[in-house]
Image (spheres, helix red, strand yellow):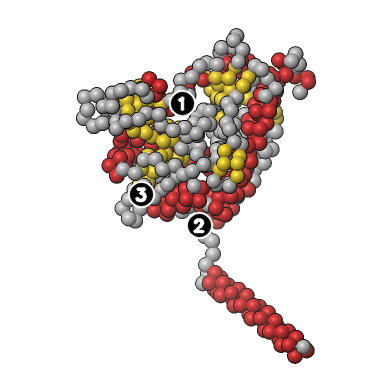
């Protein structure tokens, strides 16, 4: 027994000595590589220091300073959130209305502050000065690989057998898709339709860029029972839908019906992912995935090669492709999102949106004057559980007969939303954005609670 113990001790000492030697050798080699070869940070030092200095400026948690922001006395100043002002954004503006009109996805800003080191970029002044990459294309192959990997992990889209088109945000790709799917040299233009309520840009863009090849024709309900199979139809299908967050399918059928599936919100933080989408043309955007709307990057997964090539021609003629700086930043952000199979990003984002929805719907449930959309719980393949709703927007309806102009009712109560008529719906509806800053959401909830309380004869003092 004693002999075996001695042998074991000798073995452990030997292993420890080997381990220690390994560490010393690595330190020695690293020193020689970095110091011995006179390698050190040079041109990036000042850029990194400048970025750190601006990021460290205190704005009281109610604003941010930026490298490209306004400079006063040689120093960038704070840009304050809604309802805050002052040099450090610490002054709360009383009786300030809650602006929840836009879909600016700033709710993810805290996540990226927590991941500042892994998501930061320092780029040389000579980075990608050419129109093209080394393979004579305008598309980063590494970014394309990251996109395919992300969809595979999340399980929200089939990328196998699909071409990828990059766009300056998904906005550019919407009209590129319409043009690519429309009939060429036809005496009758293709008719673009969408189900109510719908994202306003579908109508606005189609009419703005209208050619002899296509025109906006309104609600799909006018055509879904149409017996004319020769009518060339292009349908926008938004799933989850903007504004009501519901999962949608194409309603137009027939040999001449084509669809553009806008999956901007088909990510685990906004909806359960019941299965991967495998449509012929699907559009996604970085803005609603990571929150980086300002980067302006989107992509389309396209099955048909001819449609893919037409979309490439459109983006090429329109902007000569997507900025190489944009592609680099998108690659960096997606690689952070991919860490741990996306669990860190999607867990944070989903919990934030779920908590906001629960707080808002609980407040509205106390009201008979207002209602919001109902979204049933569904099984999510990504999270592997049944989960409740966490939509990007509340689709609020004024139920009282006298409240026909619902946006005006909310406006008088200090809430600025987007009127339902913008979405082709009744003016009794208003879209309220839940994806802006925490300050924006807190102000929305505060004003909404006051409106609900007033139904029972209460006042601000009771809040």
Residue 82 in the figure: left or right of residue 68? right
Up the image or down, 253 lies above or below 421; here it is below
Instruction: Identify the disc placed on residue 198.
Output: 1
Residue placed farthest to the top in the image? 402
Nearer the N terminus, badge 1 or badge 2?
Answer: 2
Nearer the N terminus, badge 3 or badge 1?
Answer: 3
Q: Quadrant of the C terminus?
A: top right
Q: Callout 1 environment at 10 Å: few (<14), some (14 to 19), or many (20+)? A: many
The answer to which of 88 and 60 lies nearer the viewer is 60
Residue 345 in the figure: left or right of residue 252? right
Label 2 sits on residue: 43
The answer to which of 43 and 218 lies nearer the viewer is 218
Label 3 sits on residue: 161
Residue found at x 53% / y 72%: 33
Residue found at x 48% / y 24%: 197
Q: Nearer the viewer, mark 2 or mark 3?
A: 3
Residue found at x 36% / y 47%: 162
* Mark 1: secondary structure: loop
Q: Nearer the viewer, mark 1 or mark 2?
A: 1
Q: Callout 3 environment at 10 Å: few (<14), some (14 to 19), or many (20+)? A: few
Q: Quadrant of the N terminus?
A: bottom right
* Structural distance between the alpha carbons of marks 3 and 1: 29 Å
């Amino acid at each position: 027994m004693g002999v075996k113990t001695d042998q074991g001790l000798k073995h452990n000492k030997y292993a420890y000595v080997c381990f220690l030697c390994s560490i010393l050798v690595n330190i020695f080699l690293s020193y020689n590589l970095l110091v011995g070869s006179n390698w050190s940070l040079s041109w990036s030092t000042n850029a990194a220091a400048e970025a750190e200095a601006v990021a460290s400026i205190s704005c009281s948690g109610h604003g941010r300073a930026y490298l490209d922001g306004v400079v006063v006395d040689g120093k960038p100043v704070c840009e304050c959130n809604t309802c805050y002002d002052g040099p450090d954004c610490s002054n709360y503006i009383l009786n300030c209305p809650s602006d929840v009109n836009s879909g600016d996805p700033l709710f993810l800003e805290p996540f990226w502050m927590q991941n500042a080191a892994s998501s930061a970029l320092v780029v040389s002044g000579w980075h990608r000065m050419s129109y093209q990459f080394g393979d004579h294309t305008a598309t980063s192959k590494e970014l394309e690989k990251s996109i395919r990997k992300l969809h595979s992990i999340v399980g929200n889209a089939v990328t196998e057998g699909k071409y990828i088109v990059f766009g300056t945000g998904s906005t550019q790709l919407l009209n590129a898709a319409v043009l690519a799917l429309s009939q060429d040299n036809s005496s009758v233009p293709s008719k673009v339709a969408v189900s109510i309520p719908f994202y306003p840009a579908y109508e606005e863009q189609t009419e703005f860029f209208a050619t002899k090849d296509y025109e906006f024709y309104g609600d799909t309900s006018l055509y879904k029972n149409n017996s004319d199979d020769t009518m060339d139809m292009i349908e926008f299908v938004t799933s989850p839908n903007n504004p009501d967050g519901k999962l949608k399918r194409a309603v137009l059928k027939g040999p001449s019906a084509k669809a553009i599936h806008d999956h901007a919100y088909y990510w685990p933080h906004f909806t359960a992912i019941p299965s991967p989408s495998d449509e012929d043309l699907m559009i996604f955007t970085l803005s609603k995935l990571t929150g980086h709307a300002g980067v302006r990057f989107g992509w389309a997964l396209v099955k048909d090669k001819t449609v893919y090539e037409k979309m490439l021609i459109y983006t090429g003629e329109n902007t000569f492709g997507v900025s190489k700086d944009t592609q680099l930043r998108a690659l960096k952000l997606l690689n952070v999102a991919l860490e741990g199979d996306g669990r860190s990003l999607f867990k944070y984002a989903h919990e934030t949106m779920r908590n906001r929805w629960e707080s808002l719907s609980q407040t509205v449930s106390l009201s008979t004057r207002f209602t919001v959309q109902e979204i049933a719980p569904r099984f999510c393949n990504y999270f592997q559980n049944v989960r409740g709703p966490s939509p990007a927007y509340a689709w609020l309806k004024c139920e009282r007969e006298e409240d026909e102009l619902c946006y005006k009712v909310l406006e008088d109560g200090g809430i600025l939303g987007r009127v339902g008529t913008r979405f082709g719906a009744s003016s009794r509806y208003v879209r309220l954005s839940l994806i802006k800053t925490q300050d924006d959401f807190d102000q929305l909830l505060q004003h909404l609670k006051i409106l609900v309380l007033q139904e029972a004869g209460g006042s601000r003092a009771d809040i």
